[in-house]
Amino acid sequence: MSNQPGGPNYPAASTPGAAPASSSNGMAIASLVLGIIGTVVGLFIPIIGVIGGVVGLILGILARRRSLSRGIVLGGIILSAIAIVVGIVGFIINAIALANLMN
């Protein structure tokens, strides 16, 4: 039995919890997700690939300036750059396909 009356000893209500995640980690994850989506969808819907890649690249660069989590940031930047290239290739492929359909 405990020497304190009143039941179990609970921590005080004002005890701080875990620190909130920094916004740079959120930007790094968003950059990675946009890079993945842009890379996968870029050939079929090129505008999504290019826009997702550009936004992901911007978020990745901003997160790199603010963060220490280099792996996710670097992955987001690389995949976003690939998404831009895939989107441009998708535009070219779609233009060639449409030109062949017109003839």
Image: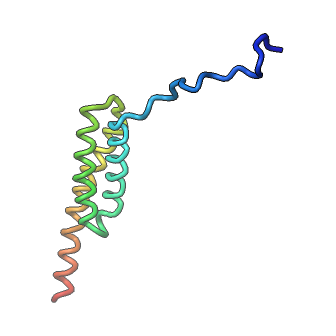
**Quarter assignment of residue 64:** top left
Residue 7 location (% of width, % of height) = 77, 22
Rendered view: 97 above or below 77 = below
Is 23 placed above or below 42 here?
Answer: above
Q: Against 57, is 91 above or below? A: below
Q: Is residue 48 left or right of residue 72?
A: left
Hey, which residue is sitting farthest top in the picture?
3
Relative placement, left or right, of 96 versus 19 is left
Residue at x 33%, y 33% (from the top left corner): 70
**Colour scheme employed for the rendering of this structure:** rainbow
Where residue 98 sits: x, y (%)? 20, 81
Q: Where's the C terminus, which quadrant?
A: bottom left
* Quarter occupied by the N terminus: top right
Residue at (37% x, 44% y) in the render: 29
**Nearest to the observer: residue 18 or residue 34:** 18
* Nearer to me, 61 or 88: 61
Quarter of image, res 100: bottom left
Q: Where is residue 31 drawn, in percent x and y?
A: 32, 47
Give the percent coordinates (x, y) of residue 25.
Answer: 36, 37
Determine the residue located farthest toward the right in the rendered image: 1
The residue sitting at 22% across, 71% down in the picture is: 93
| Up-down relation of residue 98 to residue 57 (above or below) | below
Residue reaching furthest bottom? 103
Q: Residue at x 28, y 63 (%)?
A: 48
